[in-house]
Image: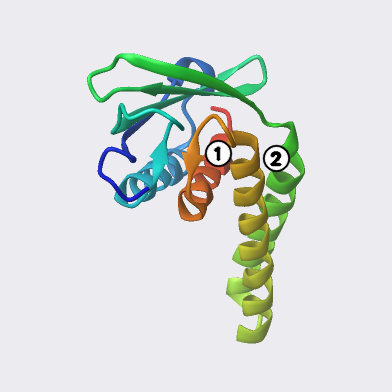
Amino acid sequence: MTDNRHRLVAVTLDEESIGRGTPDQEHERAVAIYDILETNAFRIPDEDRGPYALHLALRDGRLAFCIRSPDGDTLMTHHLSLSPLRRVIRDYEMICDSYFKAIRSASPAQIEAIDMGRRGLHDEAANVLMERLDGKVAVDFDTARRLFTLIYALHWRG
Protein backbone atom coordinates (compact mmCIF):
# COMPACT_ATOMS: atom_id res chain seq x y z
CA MET A 1 0.00 0.00 0.00
CA THR A 2 2.94 2.39 -0.38
CA ASP A 3 1.97 3.39 -3.94
CA ASN A 4 1.29 7.15 -4.16
CA ARG A 5 -2.24 6.35 -5.39
CA HIS A 6 -2.94 4.47 -2.14
CA ARG A 7 -2.75 7.36 0.24
CA LEU A 8 -4.56 10.38 1.60
CA VAL A 9 -3.53 13.73 0.17
CA ALA A 10 -6.14 15.79 2.06
CA VAL A 11 -8.20 15.52 5.24
CA THR A 12 -10.94 18.01 6.05
CA LEU A 13 -13.47 18.25 8.86
CA ASP A 14 -17.13 19.13 8.51
CA GLU A 15 -17.46 22.21 10.69
CA GLU A 16 -21.27 22.04 10.68
CA SER A 17 -21.39 18.65 12.36
CA ILE A 18 -18.15 18.71 14.32
CA GLY A 19 -18.05 22.37 15.30
CA ARG A 20 -15.12 24.56 16.21
CA GLY A 21 -13.17 23.84 19.35
CA THR A 22 -11.02 25.90 21.65
CA PRO A 23 -7.69 27.08 20.22
CA ASP A 24 -5.95 24.13 21.95
CA GLN A 25 -8.46 21.66 20.49
CA GLU A 26 -8.11 23.18 17.03
CA HIS A 27 -4.33 22.89 17.35
CA GLU A 28 -4.61 19.19 18.31
CA ARG A 29 -6.87 18.58 15.32
CA ALA A 30 -4.48 20.37 12.96
CA VAL A 31 -1.52 18.37 14.28
CA ALA A 32 -3.46 15.11 13.88
CA ILE A 33 -4.30 15.99 10.26
CA TYR A 34 -0.70 16.98 9.55
CA ASP A 35 0.54 13.67 10.98
CA ILE A 36 -1.90 11.66 8.87
CA LEU A 37 -0.89 13.46 5.68
CA GLU A 38 2.83 13.09 6.36
CA THR A 39 2.76 9.29 6.20
CA ASN A 40 -0.25 7.10 5.48
CA ALA A 41 -1.50 4.11 3.56
CA PHE A 42 -5.17 4.39 2.57
CA ARG A 43 -7.23 2.86 -0.21
CA ILE A 44 -10.62 1.56 -1.17
CA PRO A 45 -10.26 -2.22 -1.67
CA ASP A 46 -10.55 -3.40 -5.28
CA GLU A 47 -10.39 0.20 -6.49
CA ASP A 48 -7.56 2.14 -8.08
CA ARG A 49 -8.87 5.68 -8.01
CA GLY A 50 -6.48 7.28 -5.52
CA PRO A 51 -4.90 9.26 -4.16
CA TYR A 52 -7.79 10.18 -1.88
CA ALA A 53 -9.20 13.15 -0.01
CA LEU A 54 -11.02 12.33 3.23
CA HIS A 55 -13.80 14.50 4.61
CA LEU A 56 -14.93 13.57 8.14
CA ALA A 57 -18.34 14.45 9.52
CA LEU A 58 -20.56 13.37 12.38
CA ARG A 59 -23.97 12.18 11.23
CA ASP A 60 -26.55 10.60 13.53
CA GLY A 61 -23.90 9.65 16.09
CA ARG A 62 -21.69 8.05 13.45
CA LEU A 63 -18.43 9.14 11.91
CA ALA A 64 -18.89 9.61 8.16
CA PHE A 65 -15.81 8.87 6.06
CA CYS A 66 -16.56 10.76 2.84
CA ILE A 67 -13.85 9.60 0.47
CA ARG A 68 -13.28 11.78 -2.55
CA SER A 69 -10.87 12.13 -5.42
CA PRO A 70 -8.42 15.03 -5.02
CA ASP A 71 -10.60 17.09 -7.39
CA GLY A 72 -13.68 16.60 -5.17
CA ASP A 73 -15.64 13.78 -6.84
CA THR A 74 -17.25 11.56 -4.18
CA LEU A 75 -15.99 7.99 -4.49
CA MET A 76 -17.77 6.51 -1.47
CA THR A 77 -19.07 7.33 1.98
CA HIS A 78 -18.73 4.91 4.86
CA HIS A 79 -20.52 5.51 8.17
CA LEU A 80 -18.64 4.18 11.17
CA SER A 81 -20.33 3.67 14.53
CA LEU A 82 -18.31 5.23 17.32
CA SER A 83 -19.78 2.83 19.91
CA PRO A 84 -16.92 0.31 19.67
CA LEU A 85 -14.44 3.14 20.31
CA ARG A 86 -16.28 4.90 23.15
CA ARG A 87 -14.68 2.89 25.97
CA VAL A 88 -11.20 3.27 24.50
CA ILE A 89 -11.75 7.02 23.99
CA ARG A 90 -12.89 7.38 27.62
CA ASP A 91 -9.96 5.30 28.93
CA TYR A 92 -7.51 7.11 26.66
CA GLU A 93 -8.75 10.47 27.92
CA MET A 94 -8.26 9.38 31.54
CA ILE A 95 -4.76 8.06 30.93
CA CYS A 96 -3.77 11.18 28.96
CA ASP A 97 -4.95 13.32 31.89
CA SER A 98 -2.86 11.15 34.24
CA TYR A 99 0.12 11.43 31.92
CA PHE A 100 -0.01 15.23 31.75
CA LYS A 101 -0.38 15.46 35.54
CA ALA A 102 2.48 13.01 36.04
CA ILE A 103 4.81 15.04 33.85
CA ARG A 104 4.70 17.79 36.48
CA SER A 105 5.48 15.73 39.56
CA ALA A 106 6.03 11.99 39.01
CA SER A 107 9.27 10.08 38.69
CA PRO A 108 10.54 9.14 35.21
CA ALA A 109 9.63 5.49 35.91
CA GLN A 110 6.05 6.44 36.78
CA ILE A 111 5.76 8.62 33.68
CA GLU A 112 7.09 5.80 31.51
CA ALA A 113 4.60 3.32 33.00
CA ILE A 114 1.69 5.65 32.31
CA ASP A 115 3.00 6.31 28.79
CA MET A 116 3.22 2.57 28.11
CA GLY A 117 -0.43 2.25 29.10
CA ARG A 118 -1.33 5.18 26.87
CA ARG A 119 0.48 3.61 23.90
CA GLY A 120 -1.24 0.28 24.59
CA LEU A 121 -4.69 1.91 24.49
CA HIS A 122 -3.73 3.77 21.31
CA ASP A 123 -2.72 0.45 19.73
CA GLU A 124 -5.99 -1.16 20.87
CA ALA A 125 -7.97 1.67 19.29
CA ALA A 126 -6.02 1.32 16.04
CA ASN A 127 -6.87 -2.39 15.92
CA VAL A 128 -10.56 -1.69 16.57
CA LEU A 129 -10.56 0.93 13.84
CA MET A 130 -8.91 -1.43 11.34
CA GLU A 131 -11.50 -4.11 12.17
CA ARG A 132 -14.39 -1.65 11.75
CA LEU A 133 -13.04 -0.44 8.38
CA ASP A 134 -12.20 -3.93 7.10
CA GLY A 135 -13.60 -4.51 3.63
CA LYS A 136 -14.53 -0.85 3.20
CA VAL A 137 -11.25 1.03 3.58
CA ALA A 138 -7.78 -0.48 3.79
CA VAL A 139 -5.33 1.25 6.11
CA ASP A 140 -2.10 0.11 7.68
CA PHE A 141 -1.58 0.05 11.44
CA ASP A 142 0.26 3.39 11.58
CA THR A 143 -2.47 5.12 9.58
CA ALA A 144 -5.11 3.59 11.86
CA ARG A 145 -3.21 4.98 14.86
CA ARG A 146 -3.11 8.43 13.27
CA LEU A 147 -6.81 8.25 12.40
CA PHE A 148 -7.59 7.36 16.01
CA THR A 149 -5.58 10.38 17.12
CA LEU A 150 -7.82 12.52 14.92
CA ILE A 151 -10.99 10.75 16.10
CA TYR A 152 -9.87 11.35 19.69
CA ALA A 153 -9.26 15.02 18.87
CA LEU A 154 -12.76 15.16 17.36
CA HIS A 155 -14.45 13.84 20.47
CA TRP A 156 -14.32 17.43 21.78
CA ARG A 157 -17.31 18.91 20.03
CA GLY A 158 -17.09 22.64 19.63
Q: Is residue 155 visible?
A: no
Identify which residue, 158 or 54, lies in the foreground.
54
Decide if residue 9 is on the left or right side of residue 23. left
Mark 2 Cα shell of 10 Å, populated few (<14), some (14-19), many (≥20): some
Q: Which mark is residue 85?
A: 2
Q: Secondary structure at mark 1?
A: helix
Mark 1 Cα shell of 10 Å, populated few (<14), some (14-19), many (≥20): some
Q: Where's residue 90, x and y in %?
A: 73, 46
Q: Amino acid at mark 1?
A: Ile
- Are the residues tagged 2 and 1 within 8 Å (C-beta)? yes
Above-or-below relation of 62 to 156:
above
Residue at mark 1:
151
Q: Amino acid at mark 2?
A: Leu
Badge count: 2
Q: Secondary structure at mark 2?
A: helix
Q: Where's residue 134, x and y in %?
A: 59, 37
Which residue corresponds to the image point at 37% horizontal and 50% vertical from the top-left?
35
Quadrant housing the C terminus: top right
Which residue corresponds to the image point at 33% horizontal and 40% vertical from the top-left?
6
**Whole-number angstrom distance, CA of label 2 to CA of label 1:** 9 Å
Identify which residue, 56 or 110, lies in the foreground.
56
